[in-house]
Amino acid sequence: MDFDRLIADVKEDLTQVEQVILGHLDTEIPLLNDVAQHILRSGGKRLRPAVLILSARMFGGAGEAIHQAAASLEFLHTATLLHDDVVDGSDLRRQQKTARIVWGNSASVLVGDYLLAIAFRSLTLLEDLVVLDTISHATSLMAKGEILQLIRRFESASESDYLAIIVHKTASLFAAATKIGACFGGAPPERQESLYRYGHDLGIAFQIVDDALDYVEDRSKVGKPLGVDLRERKVTLPLSRLLAVVNEGERAELMGRLTQDELGDEDVQRVVGLMRDYEVLPYTLEEARRYTRSAQRHLEGLPDLPERGTLSQLADFVVDREF
């Protein structure tokens, strides 16, 4: 499924969003401009702005305010990526060096802080208390999700723990995007809630697939090396599932590998091999599809317009993507 073709009807809106983003990155501080542009122009699909715009247009919303709101969401998302890479010690993102590797941890954190400030400043100027409340709630959930991930350990990790993390870290911002779009479109509260639930489930599916891609053996279309999450000891759904289904001897072996100071290529290959044997990735992707089907059900009571069809197709795209 081709993403650009799928969102062709909102391409002009996304171009306007891009102009808003670039306008905020033309400051008198070269370091700030360089770091922010490095990650904002690194190949992200602008999925969150796209669902915000589609949600708004479903109810007749259009104009500069929507572009400002969509750009603010992208600033917020990008800020979390900059901070995440520092916390996780990540070297690569989307097949290029992370900002922390190029400019250092301090620059990454401070530019992330700047983007957060710009996001809230822009949303404040739009003078919509519901929008501000929605994004403030999402931001607090995202921060909690980071802390939950930080304290999670593979020794006691469960799928319910994992779900709680991605609901906070990822689903909250997708849900905010769709609700904010509905707000600017003038949708009644019950329709806003339907789109919020759609975005929530879409975000869960998106993160599950993102985590599954870490273990896909064909890396030709994946924007990072094999097993990055594993090397960083992130207990995502594939690893949680594997630990739950292996036999006692294999679990002891896995625990031995995971408690090493550093995981090498042979360790990663062994884990990936066990995932293949126990069909972990098909299980993981079916879990993602379960959430996309739920997301699509939340669209059923909404106006039968092209935007609704595109949102439904985007849910399928999230699971079928290869990057």
Image (cartoon, rainbow, N blue to C red):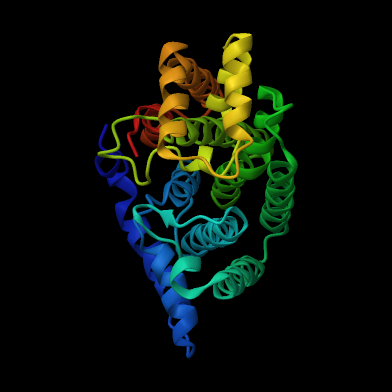
Q: Locate residue 144 relative to residue 101 in the image: left or right.
A: right
Q: How many marks?
A: 0
Residue 119 is at least partly visible in this image: yes
Q: In the image, is residue 151 above or below residue 143?
A: above
Give 231 or 87, whichever is nearer the viewer. Answer: 231
Percent across and percent down for residue 84 are 58, 55
Residue visible at 69% across and 24% down? 158
Residue visible at 75% across and 43% down? 151
Residue 236 is at least partly visible in this image: no
Q: In the image, is residue 215 above or below residue 293?
A: below
Looking at the image, the residue that sits furthest to the top is 247
Residue visible at 47% across and 85% down? 27
Residue visible at 37% across and 44% down? 225
Give 32 or 238, whichever is nearer the viewer. Answer: 238
Percent across and percent down for residue 157 are 70, 27
Q: Quadrant of the C terminus?
A: top left
Name which quarter of the figure residue 40 lies in.
Answer: bottom left
Name which quarter of the figure residue 166 lies in.
Answer: top right
Percent across and percent down for residue 183 are 61, 49
Q: In the image, is residue 13 above or below residue 222?
A: below
Percent across and percent down for residue 231 are 52, 42
Give 67 or 189, whichever is nearer the viewer. Answer: 67
Q: Quadrant of the N terminus?
A: top left
Name which quarter of the figure residue 170 lies in.
Answer: top right
